[in-house]
Image (cartoon, grey):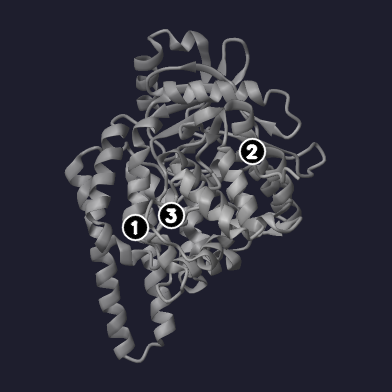
Amino acid sequence: MFSLMLPRRTWFAPAPLTVGLSSSGTLGVMADLPRKAAARTARLAALPLGYAGRTAVGFGRRMGGAPAETVLSEIQQRTAEQLFRTLGELKGGAMKFGQVLSVLESALPEEVAGPYREQLTRLQDDAPPMPTQTVRDQLTKDLGADWADRLVWLDGGPTAAASIGQVHRGRWADDREVAVKVQYPGAGDALLSDLRQLARLARTVGPLVPGVDIKPLIAEVQARASDELDYTLEAEAQRAFAAAFRDDPDFVVPDVVEVGESTLVTEWLESPHSLATVIREGSQEERDHYGQLFVRFLFAGPARTGMLHADPHPGNFRILPTEDGRPGRLGVLDFGAVARLDGGGLPEAMGRLIRVAAQADHEQLEQGLREEGFIKDRVRVDPDLLLDYLAPFVEPTKVESFRFTREWMREQFQRINNPREPTYTVALKLNLPPNYMLIHRTWLGAIGVLSQLGAEAPFKAILEEYLPGFADPT
């Protein structure tokens, strides 16, 4: 997760996002997942056209004397509404891409992020549901005609719906409350089709979200699409995490009850809301408490299971207050995106290189980066610029307690992505080794969530406890 490389224009790209087995509201009602490729393509293709039309109307209003700031704000607000309403309604790859953008919100300049924030954060918890009969048909297909003998009660409406499936509350034959995640019919085809279409439209969709390079974000989602459609693989990972965190005082991972090709049944997790709600309206105490647990879980997972939960989407993390309402444990859902780590844990070199960067040891840092494949042979990098470039990763480790903020994240985004900044050229010279790829994406997504939370955490101490190689051997 703490990769020491920021590829050009993709620094804040989080891991691909999946549906969580969670309890939340939904947006409206849809008849079904639109599966006809031509219809879905037309909806996506209309997005840049709508933006162009609004821009033209805005130009006319400015010619008529309307203030430029007012016109721009209105254009951005209407664009945000159309963009994220369309992505949410289409589900599939469109919805997933919209959720990816939701984690980027804290990196955008305030004048851009403001009009988008409500629509972006809504996608962190919500999406339109599919009909009950479709759910029952899927259960019959996956679990057999006698599924109702085991799943003795199923709520008629979903408690959560997202990019490739939705969740219903139910009761198993042994009286356990369960969450039943059912994949939309045709979700795989829709997911891959949407991503191909979005890739083709990357250049024209780009202006809808100023300051974000759309093409590499879509590539990030495409890279993990097949794994996220495989519920058997997800169940295997969730069972391992549930066993590793069973009876933990700080974390709860629901165990798997049954799995089929496109159905996953897990134990129910009772929670009032997710981190997305804490981001919107949580107290500072809640932000700090759950932000710290969020970071600790992402590091403790590899240490206990040899796997990294690679989907730091706020909807996948549920708050569990104590009986008197104080901040309590953190529930973790959705293990569709998991990095199975070489060597059974995070690389020792990762922690060691972050430590030597914090110590400003130019020689050891460059040597270590070359040994790990971050700097190729015959590539020369200015050591001072290299340290300056890595500062966003190292800065939180140099103090006992660090507060992540939207302002801090925007500052880092500007440093890395502005061609006028000296550190911009460093990105062109660095390489991201394959074994760091998903670790890197997860770390960047986690930074986005922490910055949205505005959380303060003893980051250095957490790394010393869980990240191999980080604690100073002296």
Choose between 51 and 443: the one closer to the eye: 443
Disc 3 packing (10 Å; few <14; some 14–19; many ≥20): many
Please state the horizontal and vertical placement of residue 264, each as a whole percent of the image: 46, 23
- Residue farthest right in this picture: 324
Q: Residue furthest left?
A: 38
For residue 214, the mark is: 1
The dot on residue 146 is none
Residue that appears at 24% across and 37% down: 35
Give me the disc on residue 101: 3
Q: Nearer the viewer, mark 1 or mark 3?
A: 1
Q: Position of residue 46 (x, y in %)?
A: 23, 58
Amino acid tagged 2: Pro
Quarter of the image holding residue 266? top right
Q: Nearer the viewer, residue 256 or 355?
A: 355
Quarter containing the C terminus? top right
Q: Is disc 3 placed on a helix, strand or loop? A: helix
Along the horizontal axis of the image, is 135 left or right of 304?
Answer: left
Q: Disc 2 marks which residue?
A: 468
Which quarter shows the N terminus? Answer: top right
The residue shown at (53%, 61%) is 106
Residue 142 is at least partly visible in this image:
yes
